[in-house]
Image (spheres, grey):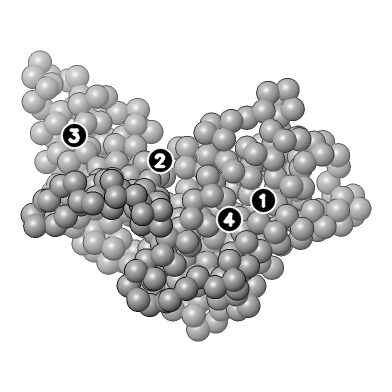
């Protein structure tokens, strides 16, 4: 699901931001008009997020070709009917439709008719019956989290940052969670802080063991590469988690860092620098809407400190204390083959690894 989001909504947002900020006419002019709505290249990519998510889910479930292609329609329906909580509706409904399609795939001599009919018909019916309720529930949950973060920025800054950072490192999708809940604003800023704390924290504190390859693959790829080591010794997770609990409330209380770009960016951290780019795209949109007149030095300072500098400084310091306590030993953070064959960023992106 995260890969589908990345290949549609995220890329579309990045293309639009580049076009607007660099004044690239090709990227800002409409290339299509559908139902009276004008779409740029990035706009078309973002509009396909539902089909892209559903197809990615089908691919992860190893769905046969006819099921996989039929899920494109299911994803469009679930996302459209799910409203603001569309990603969660797509996630749940695409899984059910895919399994129903797989159940009949190859079972009849007219498979080319039966499989698409079952997959599409069941997916659209489920979308009609349940997508609005699923979307509303997700939206209300996200709204509550954002309201609570605004009301109690210190406490919720700690909780949201720690939880989303943990989710990013676990084999689940923090990006998908943020997208499903529509997590933006201060809560999105706290989520970004937690994700960056994990990625940058693990990358810097394991520099001695993993070198440049580990720094890049974890810092710009995903901290989930450390999951095997965490299973062997969970105490290596102490420093990044504590770091996220420090940077989260700093983001909400001190810097007022808000994610007003795409909600999915809140859960991406420094993966391809999508998280910081999401914050910047929010600033750019606010300037275009007349909400702000300038991106101030304090804005840039807060983003840089929360995303990179503080995790790079705080996490290694806490890690040293953990090592001194005898809870972590040299080699506990070593990634398999990190020095012999540096991992590529593409192979380790947060979006790809979550699948």
Label 1, secondary structure: give it: helix
- Nearer the N terminus, badge 2 or badge 3? 2
Q: Residue at x 23, y 58 (%)?
A: 82
Label 4, secondary structure: give it: helix
What is the distance, in whole Å, between disc 2 and disc 3 at their CAs?
18 Å
Judged by depth in the image, the label closer to the viewer, 2 or 1, is 1
- Nearer the N terminus, badge 1 or badge 4? 4
Label 2, secondary structure: give it: helix
- Nearer the N terminus, badge 3 or badge 4? 3
10 Å crowding of disc 2: few (<14), some (14-19), many (20+): many
- Are the two marked residues, 1 and 4, in contact with CB atoms closer than 8 angstroms? no
The residue wearing badge 3 is: 70
Q: Which x, y percent locates residue 39?
A: 20, 52
Q: Is residue 49 left or right of residue 255?
A: left
What is the distance, in whole Å, between disc 1 and disc 4 at their CAs?
9 Å
What is the distance, in whole Å, between disc 3 and disc 4 at their CAs?
34 Å
10 Å crowding of disc 4: few (<14), some (14-19), many (20+): many
Q: Residue at x 34, y 37 (%)?
A: 56
Residue 200 is labelled as: 1
What is the distance, in whole Å, between disc 2 and disc 1 at their CAs?
21 Å
The residue wearing badge 2 is: 3
What is the distance, in whole Å, between disc 2 and disc 4 at their CAs?
17 Å
């Amino acid at each position: 699901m995260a890969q589908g989001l990345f290949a549609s909504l995220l890329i579309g947002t990045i293309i639009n931001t580049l076009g607007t900020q660099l004044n690239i006419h090709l990227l800002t002019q409409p290339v299509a008009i559908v139902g009276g709505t004008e779409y740029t290249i990035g706009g078309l990519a973002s509009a396909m997020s539902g089909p892209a998510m559903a197809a990615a889910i089908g691919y992860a479930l190893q769905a046969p070709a006819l099921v996989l292609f039929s899920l494109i329609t299911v994803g469009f329906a679930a996302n459209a009917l799910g409203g603001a909580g569309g990603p969660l509706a797509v996630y749940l409904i695409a899984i059910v439709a895919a399994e129903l399609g797989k159940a009949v795939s190859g079972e009849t001599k007219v498979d080319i008719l039966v499989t698409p009919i079952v997959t599409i018909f069941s997916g659209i019916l489920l979308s009609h019956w349940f997508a609005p309720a699923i979307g509303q529930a997700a939206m209300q949950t996200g709204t509550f989290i954002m309201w609570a973060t605004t009301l109690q920025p210190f406490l919720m800054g700690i909780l949201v940052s720690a939880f989303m950072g943990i989710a990013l490192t676990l084999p689940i999708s923090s990006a998908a969670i943020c997208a499903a809940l529509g997590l933006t604003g201060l809560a999105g800023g706290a989520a970004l802080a937690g994700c960056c704390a994990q990625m940058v924290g693990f990358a810097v504190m394991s520099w001695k063991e993993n070198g440049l390859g580990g720094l890049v693959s974890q810092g710009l790829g995903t901290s989930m590469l450390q999951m095997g080591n965490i299973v062997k010794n969970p105490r290596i997770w102490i420093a990044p988690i504590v770091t996220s609990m420090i940077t989260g409330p700093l983001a909400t209380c001190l810097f007022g860092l808000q994610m007003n770009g795409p909600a999915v960016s809140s859960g991406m951290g420094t993966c391809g620098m999508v998280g910081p780019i999401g914050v910047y795209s929010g600033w750019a949109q606010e300037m275009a809407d007349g909400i702000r007149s300038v991106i101030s030095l304090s804005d840039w300072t807060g983003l840089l400190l929360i995303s990179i500098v503080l995790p790079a400084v705080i996490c290694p310091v806490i890690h040293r204390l953990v090592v001194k306590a005898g809870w972590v030993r040299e080699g506990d953070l070593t990634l398999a083959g990190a020095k012999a064959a540096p991992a590529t960023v593409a192979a380790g992106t947060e979006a790809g690894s979550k699948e």
